[in-house]
Amino acid sequence: MYLKGDKIVYPLYGAGVIEDIEDKEVDGELQTYYVLHIPVGNLTIKISASKAESQRVRAVHESGEINGLISDAIGIHVNMPDNWNQRYKENMERIKSGEITQVAVVFYNLLLRERERGLSTAEKKMMTTAKQIILSELILSLDVDKNEAEEILDNTFSQSEGS
């Protein structure tokens, strides 16, 4: 169980801070909810504490490991299908995993594809979502603002351009 003030990641939405823990009666049963505030996008979400594990909620990575986990995406070769629908489905599964390296793989591969061929509207939205998820965890892990997090992300993936 997480506590008020804990920094956690909720897949598909990103990293946030538990602002409160509420008990609510649902169908005659008392259930506990985390009230999660996600700074990127200024979003507040309630997550069922009993379902947090099955929804792959996890703690934010430590500051000493976050950069390495994101840059690991550069070395992961992914064969992206030509069919955009199949590619979208595979990328969505990576994002749903909640693992920062897998989200970074999606962002990085879509970034490369955009530079080479362009992206569909759905893939542009997915790339933006992946970026927001990464930025939210960078912000909370490294205690930086959004601009600094974007600079870190840009620097991480611009290093690979010469590869």
Image (cartoon, grey):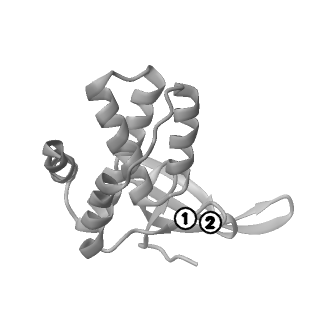
2 or 1: tag closer to the N-terminus:
2
- Report the residue marked by disc 2: 52
Q: How many marks can you see?
A: 2
Q: Is residue 32 left or right of residue 90?
A: right
Q: Amino acid at mark 2?
A: Ala
- Cα–Cα gap, marks 2 and 1: 5 Å
Can you see residue 41? no
Q: Amino acid at mark 1?
A: Val
Q: Residue at 40%, 59% (x, y): give it.
A: 100
Check contact, mark 2 vs mark 1: CB within 8 A. Answer: yes
Coordinates of residue 1 in the picture (x, y in percent): 58, 78
- Report the residue marked by disc 1: 57
Question: Which residue occupies the foreground of this view, 59 or 96?
Answer: 96
Question: Which residue occupies the foreground of this view, 45 or 120?
Answer: 120
Quadrant hosting residue 56: bottom right
Q: Residue at 31%, 56% (x, y): give it.
A: 75
Q: Residue at 21%, 48% (x, y): give it.
A: 157
Coordinates of residue 135 in the picture (x, y in percent): 30, 51
Rendered position, 146 above or below 17: above
